[in-house]
Each structure stands twice: as structure tokens, then as C-alpha cells.
Image (spheres, rainbow, N blue to C red):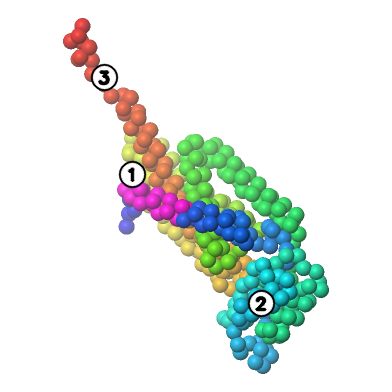
Amino acid sequence: MKLSINKSRSLWWTISAAIILAGIISMVISWQQPNIHAPLRPGLDFIGGTRLQFVRDCTKPGNCDKPININAVREVAKAQGLGDSSIQLISENGAENGVLIRTKDLTVDQRTKLQNALSEEIGVFDPQKNQIDSVGPTLGKELLRSGLLALIVSFIGITIYMSFRFQLDYAVFAIVALFHDILITVGVFSILGLVAGIEVDSLFIVALLTITGFSVNDTVVIYDRIRETIKINPERPIAEIVDDAVNQTLTRSINTTLTVLLTLTSIFLFGGETLRNFSLALIIGFTMGAYSSIFIASTLLTWWRERGESQVVESLEPIDTSASSQDS
């Protein structure tokens, strides 16, 4: 089957625009939420504080018979003066037998009191699975600043590289495709932050950097084939050249993406809580990277080149001089 991506390019652009718009709306709503105040729900790495994870010990008889009542957990936290904390239930062995609490900085004594109070309410915890992390707000801001700087530098480096390797229009549309992938990934996480309480941490910045590298690599492969075909058949319509280039590289793109997605899906399912959001970001970004290389970067290049060709044709059209001859 041969794809004719340029015949339906308005459809591809509309789909992308709708997803990006939904993400932007979500980021605006998220910013207005009193407990978030950011486009994405920030994790402990960025805002500082204490994160406590307590998991019940199901080896003890009757300890895990009843499901955890999240309202009871909130009441315990409120009684400890932590009513504004973020509280989530976490799965352990297929059941929600743990709680994840993100709150302000706590002293050792405050942590101990909270743990004891929760244990009395919902059951005995397994000390081997309990986790307590603390991050200062200064370090959190530095992590955010460094991550954003790394993203900006990567975009500049990719633009310079693409400009030298290809022409400027290639580089511009490759960057547009990168922004497309990043915006969709960020937008999806903003939506998930609102509806599912998913937070972003420093690994999310690492995921965005990885996505840019994967996406531009796929775009370079298609652009290389386009450039080679133009050198051989410069008179051929650009839409046909791009469609052929996409079809010639389509199998490679699909196989590469599926192989990576299989690995990432395994990490998402079995890698634990720490890597789950990281792998989810990569799954979204890599899928969008393959999509944008085929349906966004390529079709935008076609549109631009066709626009340039039409302007050249208009400038070469003969001027009607009959009227001026009759006047003379």
C-alpha cells in the first residue's frame, strides 16, 4: 500500500492542531488551579518538600483485607496539620495497598507521627517498601532552570545542524515538528495532571530531551531521501517526491518505533513507580515523533516548496502589452 500523505495534509494538520489546542487549554486551566499554579502539576523535584510513600505489609494476616479509604487518609493528614497535602493511592501487587503523600518540608518527628497515625488507621506498613524523600525549594528551581536551558540549547543545536546539512526550510520545518512533539507530550501530561494527579519531575525533562533526538533522527532520514530524489529528478513535482520518500522509509520508521515502544511499554508496566511517568512521556513523544516526521515535517516542506514554485510561475507569466500598443 502506497501512502499519499500530501492529499490529506489538511487533515493531519487539523488533528495535530486539535490535540495541541486541548493541551494548551489544559495548561491554562492548570495554571489557575490553587494547588498547582503551573502549566503542569509539578513534582517534588521542582517545588521542594517531602514525599512519603507507605505500603501495607500484606504478609500479616488481615492487614490488607480492606481497601484503603483515601478520605480516612486525608482526615489523618488534616489532623496532623497537613490538610493541603497531595495524597494518592498507589498499586502494589495489583491492589491499592499504599499511599503517596506529597507535602511541605517535615521534620523527622513530624514524619514519625504521621506514619504512626496512618498505620493505626489503615494497617501496618512494610518498612522495606516505605520511601521518604526531601528536596529543598532552591534545588527544585535550579533543576527546572537547568532543564529548560538544556532544552533551549538542544533546539538551537538542532537548528544549526539541520541548516548546515540541508537548506534552511528543511531546518525550520524540522524544528516545527519538534515543537509539535514537545507541545503534545507536555499537553497530554497537563491533562493527566488535572484528571489523574500525575506529576512531572526531573526525569520528565530528560524524556523531552530524548524525544527531540529521536524525532529529529526520523525526520533526517526522510529529508535525506527527499534531497537525493530532487538531485536526480529536479523537474519532478515536489509532492510526488515527498510521497515516495515517505513510502520508501515508512517500513524503517514503523519498525524502529515499534521496537522502541515495546521496550518502553515493558518499562511502563514493570519498571515501578519511579520510571512509570518517564516511560509514559517517552511513549507519547516517540509516537508523536514518528507521526510528525511523516505527516507534519514532510507535508509542510511540500506546501512551502509548492508555494515557492507557484510564485516563480506567476512572476514568469507574460505581460499582456496589446492594450498599450493600441493606445500608442
Dominant SS in magenta: helix
Point 73% across, 65% down: residue: 104
Region in magenta:
5-21
Q: Amino acid at mark 2?
A: Glu
Q: Secondary structure at mark 3?
A: loop
Residue 249 against residue 135 in the figure, above or below: above
The residue singled out by tag 2 in the image is 75
**Nearer the camera: disc 3 or disc 1:** 3
**Nearer the camera: disc 2 or disc 1:** 2
- Does residue 244 appear in this view? no
Q: Secondary structure at mark 1?
A: helix
The residue singled out by tag 3 in the image is 319
Which of pointers 2 and 1 lies earlier in the amino acid sequence? 2
Point 26% across, 21% down: residue: 318
- Toward the top, the furthest residue is 328
Is residue 125 shown left or right of residue 250?
right
